Image: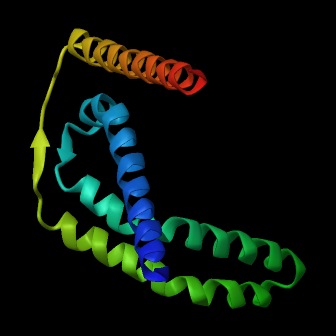
Amino acid sequence: MQQAGFHGKVSGFITGDITTTLAAQIGTLPIMLGTFGNYGVLSILVNALVLWTVPVVMTAGSLAVLAGFIFAPLSKIFLYPAYPFLFFFQEVVSFFGRSNVQISIQNVPVEIWLGYYFLMLAVIVWFSMHKSKTAIEERDSASE
């Protein structure tokens, strides 16, 4: 029974990372393509694999900075444990970066990007309205 709870938490954690990554990538796609001219197709997978290391590294780095204000060599106590996470992050990104699986788009008109964001806005509004409608229907059926 306890193991099912663990699997549920891990599954929710992974789903949350993928959802966050997907939302960020969809929202910034025109900016990435407009600025860099290409988009890494495997970037969602790579981000999902390494995203969990970011809070660990950020926490260790923040603690190291605070400890460094007190006594600089003390900061190493917090930095050394972060090294395996940084190493994992760097190796995963480097490995998938060598695959060079990407989409390249050059000189896309501004109208296309504006249309993209208007379409995204319409989808968000639609989902928001659908969610509100569902919540109202659930509330009404519970009160009957």
Is 21 rendered above or below residue 73? above
Q: Tell which of 99 and 46 is nearer to you.
A: 46
- Residue 19 percent coordinates (x, y): 37, 47
Q: Is residue 111 left or right of residue 71?
A: left
Foreground residue among 22 and 94: 22
Q: How is the image coloured?
A: rainbow
- Which image quarter: residue 30? top left
Depth check: 101 or 52 in front? 52
Q: Residue at x 38, y 67 (%)?
A: 50
- Disc tally is 0
Residue at figure coordinates x 38%, y 80% from the top left: 88
Q: Classify the position of the C terminus by image quarter.
A: top right
- Give the answer, above or below, for where 104 lies relative to 66: above
* Residue 15 % position (x, y): 37, 56
Q: Is residue 57 left or right of residue 114?
A: right
The residue at the far front in this view is 144
